[in-house]
Image (cartoon, rainbow, N blue to C red):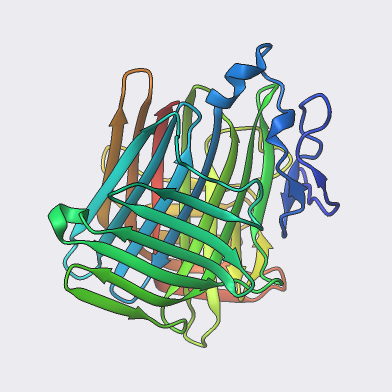
């Protein structure tokens, strides 16, 4: 198996010709996201309509899964929030499509700044602070006036490692992504008349920070989990496949106490005709053997003609084993996570 390329030198994402300056993965965000250097259309004015940028936050509490996203798809913005009750299975999601992404603010790099969208009905505000990453949501009309608000701090110390990847998609397109798992969460999550207090010893979050230029027709699988081992250590997984040239690197890793343990390419085995059947994950080196037993499927569809997206996101409990870089084999028992199948024309 060809070894994966670890990026260790900081630099620019794109060189003066618009090509990727480096390809591979890294433990820290080392590359400056200089999207202004992209060169994939002769008329540069049209390039912004093909660039995709998003910040997707996910938080697991003892009772719920909560997620909030701000995205700029070039020709439109998209903000959405959803919440899942583990005991009852109640899932509710709402979103807005914003023409030409007016009012959507996203920072240049994942290490800085504020991501924001606000109008008279909703406000989403994500910010990077010395303590970590703050996620604030205000949506009083959510679920027919039931209302939802969140004020959450995800602790992210400077030494926290993350799964960073940059890979080409064809000749001029690319995927640049940072996934941060296992961020202890504290604050409050209010849904209707209930307010849940989040404690960092039992609630945990993650970030999917994506930038890039995809093919018009795209497909991918992704799986993610963050939680706690019985001894109190944090443990998480980030697994993905389906698009781009991954010969230099995949985004497959498991995270133990804030440190990345890189895996080779991971295989997703599942039945696309029945997402409630178990999903299996295994790698080429025999370090990972996991099974996700589903308890809920979220289906999200957007169909605006030439713009189409369909996501089947399956929530379940992970069981199996994984081996660290140091050779420690850990049993994973009933770790809640999710996996998804995504088709898009965008």
Would residue 129 be found to the left or right of residue 134 on screen? right
Q: Is residue 50 above or below residue 10?
A: above
Position in image of residue 77 (x %, y %): 43, 36
Would residue 332 be found to the left or right of residue 258 on screen? left
Q: Quadrant of the N terminus?
A: top right
In the orientation shown, which residue stands out farthest toward the top?
Answer: 42
> Residue at position x 40%, y 32% from top?
343
Would residue 137 be found to the left or right of residue 115 on screen? left
In the orientation shown, which residue stands out farthest toward the bottom?
Answer: 231
Position in image of residue 270 (x %, y %): 37, 45
In the orientation shown, which residue stands out farthest toward the left?
Answer: 144
Q: In which quarter of the image is the C terminus?
A: top left
> Residue at position x 25%, y 68% from top?
86
In the image, 12 versus 285, the foreground residue is 12
Q: In this view, does 313 lie above or below 169?
A: below
Would residue 139 be found to the left or right of residue 9 on screen? left
Question: Residue 275: in sight, yes or no?
Answer: no
In the image, 157 versus 244, the foreground residue is 157
* Quarter of the figure with residue 170: top right
Q: In this view, does 190 lie above or below 231?
A: above
- The tally of labels here is 0
Question: Residue 7: in sight, yes or no?
Answer: yes
Position in image of residue 169 (x %, y %): 64, 28
In the image, 23 versus 126, the foreground residue is 126
Position in image of residue 81 (x %, y %): 33, 53
> Residue at position x 45%, y 40% from top?
103
> Residue at position x 27%, y 50% from top?
121
């Amino acid at each position: 198996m060809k070894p994966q390329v670890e990026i260790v030198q900081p630099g620019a994402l794109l060189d003066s010709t618009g090509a990727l300056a480096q390809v591979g993965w890294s433990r820290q965000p080392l590359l400056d996201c200089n999207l202004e250097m992209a060169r994939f259309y002769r008329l540069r004015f049209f390039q912004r309509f093909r660039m995709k940028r998003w910040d997707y936050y996910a938080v697991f509490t003892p009772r719920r899964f909560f997620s909030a996203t701000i995205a700029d798809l070039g020709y439109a913005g998209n903000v959405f929030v959803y919440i899942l009750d583990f005991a009852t299975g109640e899932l509710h999601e709402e979103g807005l499509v914003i023409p030409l992404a007016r009012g959507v603010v996203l920072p240049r790099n994942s290490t800085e700044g504020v991501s924001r969208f606000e109008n008279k009905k909703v406000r989403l505000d994500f910010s990077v602070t010395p303590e970590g990453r703050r996620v604030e949501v205000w949506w009083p009309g959510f679920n027919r006036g039931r209302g939802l608000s969140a004020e959450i701090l995800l602790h992210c110390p400077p030494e926290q490692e993350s799964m960073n990847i940059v890979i080409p998609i064809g000749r001029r397109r690319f995927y640049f992504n940072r996934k941060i798992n296992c961020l202890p969460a504290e604050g409050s999550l209010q849904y209707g008349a209930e307010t849940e207090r989040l404690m960092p010893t039992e609630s945990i979050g993650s970030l999917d920070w994506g930038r890039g230029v995809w093919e018009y027709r795209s497909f991918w699988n992704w799986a993610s989990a963050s939680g706690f081992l019985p001894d109190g250590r944090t443990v998480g997984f980030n697994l993905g496949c389906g698009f781009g040239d991954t010969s230099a690197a995949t985004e497959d890793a498991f995270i133990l106490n804030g440190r990345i343990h890189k895996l080779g390419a991971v295989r997703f085995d599942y039945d696309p005709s029945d997402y409630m059947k178990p999903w299996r994950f295994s790698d080429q080196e025999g370090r990972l053997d996991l099974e996700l037993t589903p308890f809920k499927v979220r289906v999200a569809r957007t169909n605006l003609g030439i713009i189409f997206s369909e996501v089947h996101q399956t929530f379940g409990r992970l069981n199996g084993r994984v081996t660290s870089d140091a050779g420690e084999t850990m049993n994973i028992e009933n770790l809640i996570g999710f996996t998804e199948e995504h088709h898009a024309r965008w």
